[in-house]
C-alpha cells in the first residue's frame, strides 16, 4: 500500500513511517500541506496521514481538497489535542479516521495497516480511552 504522511510537528511520524516500511508499504513524506497535496496528486497514495495543524493550511482544508481531487483516498487526521468536537468535524468533512497524537507509533502503524474496512467500526478500549 502507498501511504503519504504529511506532518511537520508530529513527533511520531518518523517512527510510524519506519514501522510501515518494515511492514512492506511504500511511504512518502511531506512537511507542508501544499507539498502534501502535490505529492498526493502525483503519486496517488491509497492513504494520506495528515497532521491537523500545518503551517500553510489547516488540516480540514487539506482534507477537503484531497477528497475533492482524489475521491477514493483515505485521509487520516492526527490531532494534537483530543477534542471530540474536532474529531466529529473531521469525520463529517470526509476523514477516514482521526488519530490522537497520544497514540503510540506502533498503534498508529498497526491501525493504518490492519483496518482496511475503515475506522467507523467499533473502537478498541484504547481508542475509547483516548477519545
Image (spheres, rainbow, N blue to C red):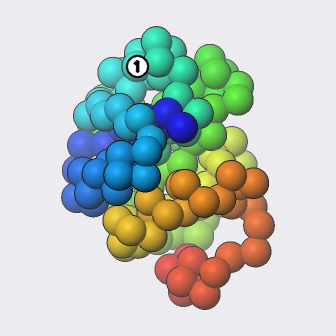
Q: Is residue 98 visible?
A: no
SS at mark 1 in the image: helix
Q: Is residue 18 left or right of residue 85?
A: left
Seen from this angle, which residue lies furthest top? 42
Tell me the residue at 31%/43% (across/down).
Answer: 7
Residue 24 versus residue 49: which sits nearer the camera?
A: 24
Percent coordinates x, y for residue 19 in the rendering: 34, 56
Q: Indicate left or right for 107 with 56 as reference.
A: right
| Residue at 47 percent of width and 37 percent of height | 3
Label 1 crowd bin: few (<14), some (14–19), many (20+), radius 10 Å? some
Q: Residue at x 68, y 52 (%)?
A: 116
- List x then y, in percent, for residue 73: 63, 32
Quadrant in which the C terminus appears: bottom right
Vertical placement of residue 68 versus 109, above or below: above
Q: Which residue is mark 1?
A: 39
- Residue 10 in picture, x, y percent from top left: 28, 54
Q: Quadrant of residue 28?
A: top left
Q: Residue placed at 65% from the left, 59% from the top?
A: 115
Amino acid at each position: 500500500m502507498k501511504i503519504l504522511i504529511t506532518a511537520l510537528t508530529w513527533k511520531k511520524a518518523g517512527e510510524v513511517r519506519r514501522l510501515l516500511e518494515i511492514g512492506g508499504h511504500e511511504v512518502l513524506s511531506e512537511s507542508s500541506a501544499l507539498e502534501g497535496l502535490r505529492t498526493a496528486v502525483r503519486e496517488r497514495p491509497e492513504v494520506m496521514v495528515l497532521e491537523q495543524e500545518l503551517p500553510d493550511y489547516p488540516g480540514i482544508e487539506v482534507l477537503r481538497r484531497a477528497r475533492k481531487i482524489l475521491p477514493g483516498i483515505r485521509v487520516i487526521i492526527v490531532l494534537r489535542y483530543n477534542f471530540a468536537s474536532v474529531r466529529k468535524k473531521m469525520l463529517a468533512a470526509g476523514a477516514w479516521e482521526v488519530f490522537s497524537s497520544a497514540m503510540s507509533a506502533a498503534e498508529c502503524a498497526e491501525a493504518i495497516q490492519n483496518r482496511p474496512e475503515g475506522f467507523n467500526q467499533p473502537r478498541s478500549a484504547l481508542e475509547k480511552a483516548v477519545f
